[in-house]
Amino acid sequence: MAAFIAKQMVGNQLSAVKDMGGGGESLSPEEKERLAQLEQERLEALREQEDRRREKHKKLEDEREKMRKGIRDKYNIKKKEQISREESLNQEIKKQDSVCSEGGLNRRKKTPEEMTAEAEEADLDEFTKFKNSIEHRLSDLKNSLESRCVIQ
């Protein structure tokens, strides 16, 4: 009898929790639009956060560079020739500008079709490289044979 009462008490609470998931319900167009808008806002917030992080790190790097310059001037140390930091930062920003960067945590997941297309493209590239190398070898062989066998 006690088991029956316990099951009745817990069973009602479990069914209420199961209904909260909402997995089987279909979304109305308004809800889909609202969810899409929320996703856009989240992505925009991520972009803004990344921009703030870049600005902060650029400021810190500028301060460090000033300190390095002071030390170089004090001890007459010459700076090694490198790609300017501005150019490298601009290149890095260009790489990371898109939200769906290739290596990022928030990148867009590839569909199976995209993955198969990339695999086919890689196979095609390997095939064309192999074909070109064979053609090159054959032409070299032909030239060497023609140079050896001179018909008079």
Image (cartoon, rainbow, N blue to C red):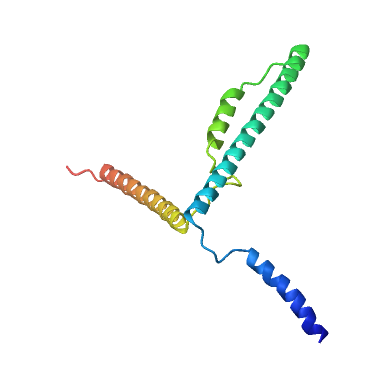
| Horizontal arrangement in the rendering, residue 105 relative to residue 98 (left or right) | right
Q: Quadrant of residue 19?
A: bottom right
Count of numbered marks: 0
Residue closer to the observer: 88 or 52:
52
| Residue 110: x %, y % from top left | 50, 53
Instruction: Please report the residue visible at 57 percent of the width from the left and 41 percent of the height from the top.
Output: 41
Q: Residue furthest right?
A: 2
Point 77% across, 84% down: residue: 4
Q: Camera-side residue: 34 or 47?
A: 34
Question: Looking at the figure, which quarter contains the C terminus?
Answer: top left
As drawn, is 149 to the left or to the right of 17? left
121 displayed left or right of 67: left
The residue located at (77%, 16%) in the rendering is: 71
The N terminus, quarter of image = bottom right
Outermost residue, bottom side: 1
Q: Residue furthest left?
A: 152
Residue at the spot 59% in from the left edge and 43% down from the top edge: 42
- Kindly tell me whether residue 37 is visible in this rendering: yes
Evaluate whether residue 84 shows in this view. Answer: no
Residue 66, picture quadrant: top right
